[in-house]
Amino acid sequence: MAAYHAAMLLDTDAAYLALKARDARFDGRFFVGVTSTGIYCRPVCRVRTPRRENCRFFGTRAQAEAAAFRPCMKCRPEIAPGLSLMDSSRSLADSAAQLIEQAVHEGQDLPMPQLAARLGVTDRHLRRIFQAAHGVGPLDFLTTQRLLLAKQLLSDTTQPITQVALASGFQSLRRFNAAFVQRYRFSPSQLRREGEVRSGGDVLRLAWRPPYDVPAMLGFFERRALQGVEEVQGLELRRTLALAHHGQPLQGWLRARFVPEQHEVHLSTSESLQPALAAVLQRMRQAFDLDADPSLIDPVMALLPLPHRPGARLPGAVDGFEVAVRIILGQQVTVKAARTLVQRLVNRYGQPIPTPYPALTHLFPDAATLATADAEVVGRLGIVRQRVKALQALATAVASGHITLHRGAPLQPTRDALKALPGIGDWTAQLIALRALAWPDAWPASDIGLMNVLGSRDPKHITALAEPWRPWRGYAVMRLWHRVETLE
């Protein structure tokens, strides 16, 4: 037990009180293993509260599974919110965990020596610091991520078991079945036969920790919505999406509906995106910042010179390249003007796509298309020459794989690579890191909106004002922008 003791919750009495209250604020921050059943649950589980002496508390799902507990079929630990990048100071181990999660959801193989090399450390050092930070080794963590992803796909979709196995990173059905049975003591086919009733229509559930400012999140997307690509209707965001999966291009649509009373987002997609459901899940978790922990962020946001609104979140990226294009075209113009320019780009280069929604008709132009577009034609859309050059330099770098834009990408090297491109300075790199790389402490000091609301034109002065908001300055950016945009 000592192997994961360091990462367990220290105050188990407080954890038991949260469990008794089914307090959703602690969802994903700890898990409880019940020794009388051999099952581990989220603190929001609706089953009868176990006796205190039968409870063991764990900081992560991987720790619970390493202690031979299997996930609850009722509360489903696989849909619990995770932890964001800044939830601890163990940056190297946390970066490794993020890269593992990214690889699992993108369906990529990630051998431990390769992971260690990407982080610039030895394999042995990686195992040591990962064990100390997360209470389990990286291979156990990887197996947990794969099996929980498989459990969600088995529970929420009708995908064939073989397809679920491949989507979860297993190279054969035999290995998948063996790992599933060894860890959970029942087979994937048993889960399908005896598991809970699905929501219908392959709806995947994603949980968050309350409070969550849903109106602010949906308002952000609605003010930037591109005709043909996306729309916000009530509590739903709908949009088209193109992505590559195992080298194959996929195109389709998705619908994400907030269900505030359940603290969940319910996600459905076109059948064409089903092979990449794991990647879509990961992208939506980032787009809606579902892993944020308000207990850490809200006390800092209360320091802002604004009326406090609990539940701050960072609107992230469904597609990192798309967000980067929007940011480049938003240089030195209003949100409305930027949307007009991006809309012209979509109208000219967006690929038509059939969907069941009349408002969704086009895909956002991909990097390869914009990289090879005639610069003169792009310029005739009203985009100034400097931004055309920046746009095409970025598109070329992304299309070639020189730059990747997702939350698993290395922060500082990516920022440096962005700033090396023509027409991309610190403001642009900071905002791309904020939204595409999910960097919660980004601070674009030269932003006019921030200067207006903070009452200063001096970037050094507003940076000094923002010092107490570390390490969540990115959340402060969104709160300050929300103030400006809703007053316009």
Image (spheres, helix red, strand yellow):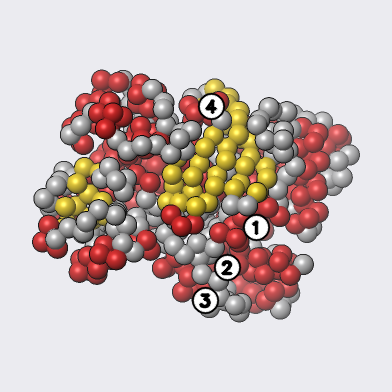
Residue linked to disc 2 = 476
Question: Label 4 neighbourhood size at 10 Å, few (<14), some (14-19), many (20+)?
Answer: few
Q: Is residue 233 left or right of residue 112?
A: right
Q: Earlier in the sequence, mark 4 or mark 2?
A: 4
Q: CA distance from mark 1 to mark 2?
A: 16 Å
**Mark 1 and mark 2 residues within 8 Å of each other at the beta carbon:** no
Q: Earlier in the sequence, mark 1 or mark 2?
A: 1
Whole-percent x, y for residue 210 in the image: 44, 62
- Callout 4 amino acid: Glu
Is any part of residue 449 visible from this angle? yes
Along the viewing direction, whichever of 163 and 215 lies nearer the viewer: 215
Q: Nearer the viewer, mark 3 or mark 1?
A: 1
Mark number, residue 219: 1
Question: Number of marks in the image?
Answer: 4
Per the image, label 2 sits on a secondary structure element best described as helix
Mark number, residue 394: none
Q: Nearer the viewer, mark 3 or mark 2?
A: 3
Q: Is residue 146 left or right of residue 107?
A: left
Q: CA distance from mark 4 to mark 2?
A: 38 Å
Q: Nearer the viewer, mark 4 or mark 2?
A: 4
Residue drawn at x 26%, y 62% is 19
Residue drawn at x 69%, y 74% is 453
Residue drawn at x 12%, y 51% is 35
Q: Considering the image in quadrants, where does the C terminus appear?
A: bottom right
Residue linked to disc 4 = 271
Q: Earlier in the sequence, mark 3 or mark 1?
A: 1
Q: CA distance from mark 3 to mark 2?
A: 10 Å
